[in-house]
Image (cartoon, rainbow, N blue to C red):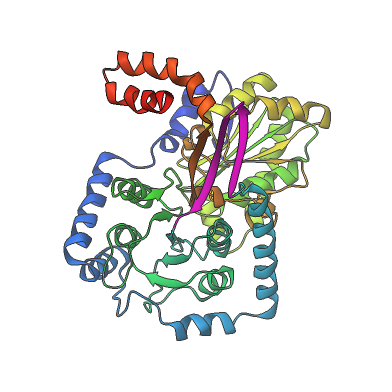
Amino acid sequence: MKNVLFELPKDKKKLIRKLALHQVLYDRELLNGVFRIFDEVEQKGDVAVKSATQIYDKVDLSNIKLSESYVDTCTSSLSSSLRNAIENGIRNIKEVNNVLMPDLYWEKQIRPGTMIGEKVTPLESVGLWIPARKGPLISTALMLVVAAKVAGVETIIVGMPPLKIGLGDPGTIAAARLAGASDFVVGNGVAVIAGFSIGTESIPEVKGIFGPGPGAIAAAMSVAFSYGKRTATGIGPTESAIIADDSANPKILAYDLISESEHGPDSSSILVTPSYDLAKEVEKHLNDVIEEVEGKQKNVLRTVFGNDGMGAIVVTPDINSACDFVNEYAPEHLMVVFKEKKRDRIIDRIKNAGEILIGESTPFSAGNYAIGITAVLPTNGFAKIFSGITCKDMIKQSTVGMLTKEALKELYPTIKEIGEYEGLPCHVKATQIRIEN
């Protein structure tokens, strides 16, 4: 492929131009369009959802909510091999989320007479958006639904784009039902998220809304937050990065580069290395492995690693500058393939990545499908400030405090001084009366 290999710092301006789209998930114009759809759903309910689906998805919907009979058919028609894979995925994801889940209640005495703690409460309901425009995403459905189940969410509703026949993808529906989803709706993504935020005749209002997608979906999640919904923003098109030294196998790295890229032409895939020789070897193999691919994915990969795509091989002056590049890029998925003695140093320097997969035996696909860690991760630089979606996003914590009378007496001078300075005498009095009584 042409224009794939870049050397820093001399090619910095060229690389910035190539990766410019990575900096923008959505703009004000798109956000305004999303607000309009929310307004229409608020005013017209199901009619607005069906209209948006016809306009943007070119599908005429008879029903937004899928029938139980269709969901049952999807589940019963799974092949035994796919069902086994789904059930194994559920077990692994559940195991990981159980480890991540905080204690439902804890308390600790931090000084004599002073106890603090936390009480964890799950969200009552969530709406989970599972994109399918580029193809079914069983893995995303499993990760989000299982996370909600482990968190203790009672009502889990899955939304997804419709097939041309007005129904949802059977395999994704079956996977979500096996994982614990209660209901399913189909429609235009922004309109369904608006429905989750506001409530329509077919789409119930929920407390939390989660799921990945392109810019419009990310913008819709931001708008949903303004409706008082728990959500996670900045989860857009797939992106991945590999940071490696000359101990890595260049042909395997070439396969890793195309692995995440096949999601779509807006995917980003980057190798960052201080080894020019490794970079040239990977570049050579990249051409070959792309030509091995058949079907529509080949054109997708040619786009990603073409002049207008966001695929690149970046050579840096040294290891530290390679880490700096990764931190600035803040990839959704990151693989670290270094000599073992250097690996801890690299991991310590990496501050911004949605996930970190360590070693050449931990490919992106293992993280996506089988380990059980979440692959619903921040993109477009949002890994600088956000984390991937797990059970921890679907709970809320209430802080707990308790004092003995003696401990309150110890705190009274602090309460009195600050309360009087803030001009809030009732605050002070509420404590004083307890001390004097």
Residue 7, magenta (yes or no): no
Q: Is residue 68 visible?
A: yes
Q: Where 256 falls versus 338 (above or below)?
A: below
Question: Residue 183 placed where, x, y %?
Answer: 44, 72
Instruction: Name the side, left or right, on which 141 lies relative to 361.
Output: left
Please state, as top left, top right, bottom left or bottom right, where the C terminus lies in the image.
top left
Q: Is residue 15 left or right of residue 363?
A: left
The magenta stretch spans residue 122: yes
Answer above or below: position of 59 versus 309: below
Q: Is residue 280 left or right of residue 351?
A: right
Comparing 246 with 395, the one in front is: 395
- Residue 337 vs 362, above or below: the answer is above
Q: Position of residue 186 (x, y in %)?
A: 37, 70
Residue at left offset 52%, top offset 83%: 72
- In this picture, which residue range is highlighted in magenta? 104-123
Q: Magenta span: helix, strand or loop, mainly?
A: strand
Asked whether 202 or 328 is in front, the reply is 202
- Whether residue 275 is situated above or below residue 413 in the rendered picture: below
Q: In the displayed image of the protein, which residue is found farthest to the right?
A: 341
Say which residue appears at 43% left-offset and 30% top-offset: 17
Residue at image location 53% in from the left, 46% down from the top: 119
Does residue 275 appear in this view?
Answer: no
